[in-house]
Amino acid sequence: MSSARHILTLFKKELLLEIRQQYSFYGILLYIGATIYVLFMTMDEPEAQVWNGLFWVIQLFICINAVAKSFLQESRGRMLYFYSIVSPGNFVLSKLLFNSALMLIMSLLSLAMFMLFLGNPIQRALPFTGLVLLGGWSLSLIFTFLAAIAARAQQNAAIMAVLGFPLIIPQLLLLSQLANATFNPVLPFHGSTIALLIALDAMVIILAVILFPFLWKD
């Protein structure tokens, strides 16, 4: 079986598990709805900069709830079984692919609910939507990579917090900087910043594929 078929099969496995364990999916939806509704009750329609900051903070916590559990929920016996039938590179790529798809869906849902309850101060809707998808993908890659490290370090979640801070802050700064340009048509939209974000995402994928086999052997 080729690597692509292995990755697709593992992706289907993740999807079936998510469908069967619907409490996890609906729990994330509840978090999104409840958080945005509380913001609506307390702030009504905030100004553009506050709206932008709140949106990316919510995105961060959505990603933590949706993605960070991906490796922590795998039992030792199940990991040993996967180790015997697939390569570690294919396994981690399937995790990255599934978590990316999940986070893209959650990002679009949170954007729709933000616009519904907190108004729509966005001046460039299409670029901001693309930025939301890129940001959701970037966050999912980082937290999937961190979850893999934490799971192999005796499931020490503190490692995720320590390693995550220097990785996630540059991403959020770049995303918020790009998002500011979508709220003010006068500000320039820098393509080089988008290229830098994509380069950081590519670096995370490469690091995951290179390092995860060594983590799995332990």
Image: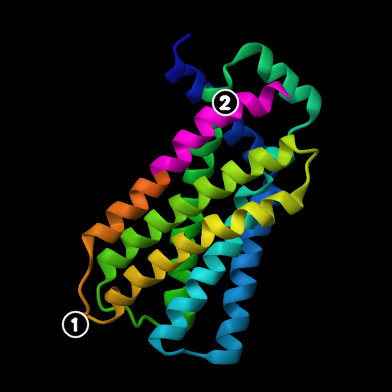
Give the residue drawn at x 51%, y 63%. Answer: 169
Q: Is residue 16 left or right of residue 202?
A: right
Residue 10 location, quadrant: top right
Label 1 amino acid? Val
Give the residue drawn at x 55%, y 85%. Answer: 40
Residue at the spot of label 1: 186
Q: Regarding mark 1 in the picture, which secondary structure is present there?
A: loop
Give the residue drawn at x 51%, y 77%. Answer: 54
Q: Which mark is residue 8?
A: none
Give x and y (percent) for residue 214.
Answer: 63, 25
Can the viewer see residue 26 in this picture?
Answer: no
Q: Is residue 128 left or right of residue 34?
A: left
Give x and y (percent) for residue 117.
Answer: 49, 80
Give x and y (percent) for residue 34.
Answer: 64, 73
The residue nearer to you, when weighing 15 against 177, is: 177
Q: Which mark is residue 91?
A: 2
Q: Which of the colour schemes (rainbow, by chain, secondary structure, one colour) is used?
A: rainbow
Give x and y (percent) for residue 109.
Answer: 48, 62
Count of numbered circles on the image? 2
Q: Is residue 205 magenta?
A: yes
Q: Regarding mark 2 in the picture, which secondary structure is present there?
A: helix
Q: Main secondary structure of the magenta part?
A: helix
The residue nearer to you, when weighing 139 against 105, is: 139
Can the viewer see residue 207 in this picture?
Answer: yes
The first of marks 1 and 2 along the sequence is 2
Above/below status of 57 relative to 64: below
Please state the extent of the stretch shown in magenta in the rendering. 202-218
